[in-house]
Image (cartoon, grey):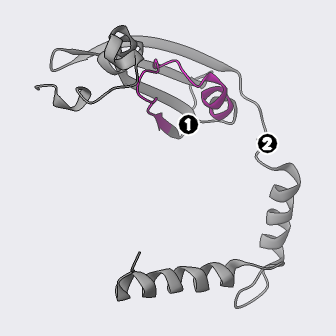
Amino acid sequence: MKLGRATGVLCAFVVVALAGCAGSGLRGFGRDTAGDAQVERHVKRGYAPDHAYATTATRETWTVDGEPIDVSLLAPSGDARHPLVVFLPGLGDAAESSLAWRKAWAEAGYAVLSVQPASEGSAVWKSEQARLGDFSSRHARPR
C-alpha cells in the first residue's frame, strides 16, 4: 500500500503530537499548582462523581413526520437545571437500552435524553433478513 505525500506528512504530525503528550508530569509554560491539585484529585477518584443524585425516568412516544419516535429521559430528581446528554442507541436497540451508562450519567448530574425511531429499535429484528445480519435494505427506505 502506497501512501500519498499528504497522508505521510499527516501521519508524521500525529506521531510527533502524540509523542509530545507522552511522559509523566504536567508540561506547559508555567506550573499551575492549583490545577495540579485538581488533576491529582481527579486521578485518585477516576470518574466517580462528587455526589450521586437520585434519578427520575420518563418514557414517551413522539410522532415526527408520521413516524413514531421512542424517547426516554433519565434525569436527576428535582427542579434544578442540569446539562443534557443526548444518547442515540444503536440499530436494533430500544430507547431504554444501555441503562448502566445512562444511569451513571444521570446519577452524576446529567439529564440523559435517549431518542430512537421506533422503526430502528427492536422492530428491526422482526425481519428474517435482519436476523441474518443483512441490513442492506435499511438505507433504501423511501421518506
Image point (76%, 31%), residue name: 52
How many tags in the picture? 2
Q: Which residue extends farthest top? A: 126
Residue 82 lies, in percent from the top left, at 56, 37
Q: Is 139 or 117 nearer to us in this picture?
A: 139
Where disc 1 sits, the SS reads loop
Q: Earlier in the sequence, mark 2 or mark 1?
A: 2
Q: Is 143 or 84 nearer to us in this picture?
A: 143
Q: What is the quadrant of the C terminus in the image?
A: top left
Residue 50 lies, in percent from the top left, at 79, 42
Vertical placement of 62 versus 35: above or below? Answer: above
Q: Quadrant of residue 40?
A: bottom right
Where disc 2 sits, the SS reads loop
Residue 60 lies, in percent from the top left, at 40, 11
Vertical placement of 39 versus 128: above or below? Answer: below
Q: Which residue is mark 1?
A: 82
Region of the chain picked out in magenta, as a range: 85-105
Q: Which residue extends farthest left? A: 142
The three-letter amino acid code for the residue at tag 1 is: His
Q: Is 82 or 14 nearer to us in this picture?
A: 14
- Relative to 63, is 123 on the left or the right? right
Image point (16%, 14%), residue name: 66
Q: What is the quadrant of the N terminus in the image?
A: bottom left
**Residue 48 - label:** 2
**Residue 114 - label:** none
Vertical placement of 17 versus 36: above or below? Answer: below
